[in-house]
Amino acid sequence: CCIACARYFLDQKALSDHEKTKAHKRRLKDLSEKAYCEEDALIGAGKGIPRAGYDDDTKTTNKQLIKDQQQ
């Protein structure tokens, strides 16, 4: 079976042929990149909180900012 693509194969040859395809290689590349989270989406839309370390005025961490927002 190919865990990355969630596919099952009857024999090893079919699996090795699958591992050479563009679809499999593209899927491996997509899985190796960091997934976006809700916080990233909000920041990208201009509605999120500033990330600690990027603004000179910001001295708190992201976790502290999220806790403050939720309260």
Image (tube, rainbow, N blue to C red):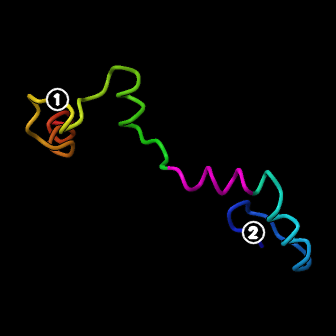
Q: Is the magenta stretch mostly helix, strand or loop?
A: helix
Packing grade of label 2 (10 A; few <14, some 14-19, many >=20) is few
Quadrant (top left/top right/bottom left/bottom right) for the C terminus: top left
Whole-Å distance between the Cαs marked 2 and 1? 43 Å
> For the point 8% across and 38% down, which residue is it?
59
Q: Looking at the image, is mark 2 or mark 1 earlier in the sequence?
A: 2
Q: Where is residue 16 in the image (x, y as percent from the top left)?
A: 84, 72
Quarter-wise, where is residue 9 in the image?
A: bottom right
Question: Would residue 8 appear left or right of 26 to someone viewing this image?
Answer: right
Q: Name the residue under label 1.
A: 55
Placement of 1 over or under 54, stated as above or below: below
Q: Name the residue under label 2.
A: 2
Placement of 59 over or under 28, stated as above or below: above
Quarter-wise, where is residue 50 in the image?
A: top left
Residue span colored magenta: 25-33
Quarter-wise, where is residue 21 in the image?
A: bottom right
11 or 29: nearer the eye? 29
Quadrant (top left/top right/bottom left/bottom right) for the N terminus: bottom right
> For the point 40% across and 21% down, which residue is it?
45
Q: Residue 28: within the magenta? A: yes
- Identify which amino acid the numbered label 1 is placed on: Asp
